[in-house]
Image: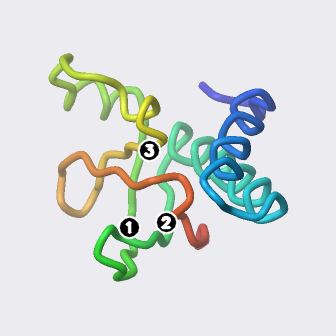
Amino acid sequence: MKTDINNLALLNRATYMVINGYDLTQSLQTSALIETLQFKLMNGTAHFLYRKKDGSIREAWGTLLERVVNNNTNGYGVPRKYYNCQAYFDIELQTWRSFKYENLITILD
């Protein structure tokens, strides 16, 4: 169970975003938001908004609970984090989804 913030991951994400042209302050805020989202996903269900590749906004309910992940993993391929993406199991559609870190808009509660 994830219980703390990974500062190194947070800084790595922010650095990647700055290199790709994003503002430093915005990059740090988005990185902190991603860390919060990962905490919520690993410890239950999260409700959040992100911008899709086509520009539309997606409202999602997702999880990364261990029992759900273990039952729905194929076990092949490259982890999404290497592509700077956040993967999650979509509860509504019962399938895996992902989005780029910089496209996270907010976490809803």
Task: Give the labeled residue for mark 3.
Answer: 85
Task: Give the labeled residue for mark 2.
Answer: 47
Q: Are marks 1 and 2 in contact (CB under 8 Å)?
A: yes
Residue 105 pos. (x, y %) = 57, 72
Mark 1 crowd level (few <14, some 14–19, many ≥20, 10 Å Cα): many
Disc 3 or disc 2, which is closer to the eye?
Answer: 3
| SS category of the residue bearing label 1 | strand
Q: Nearer the viewer, residue 55 or 86?
A: 55
Seen in the picture, residue 11 relative to 14 is either above or below; the reply is above
- In the displayed orientation, state which residue is furthest to the bottom: 56
Task: Give the labeled residue for mark 1.
Answer: 60
Disc 3 or disc 1, which is closer to the eye?
Answer: 3
Q: Quadrant of the C terminus?
A: bottom right
Cα distance in 3D space between marks 3 and 2:
17 Å
Mark 2 crowd level (few <14, some 14–19, many ≥20, 10 Å Cα): some
Q: Quadrant of residue 7?
A: top right
Cα distance in 3D space between marks 1 and 2:
6 Å
Q: Quadrant of the N terminus?
A: top right
- In the drawing, does residue 73 fall left or right of residue 83? left
Query: Could you tell me which residue is drawn at 36 percent across and 75 percent down?
Result: 58
Tell which circle, 3 or 2, labels the residue nearer the N-terminal end. Answer: 2
Q: Which mark is residue 25?
A: none
- Residue type at mark 2 is His
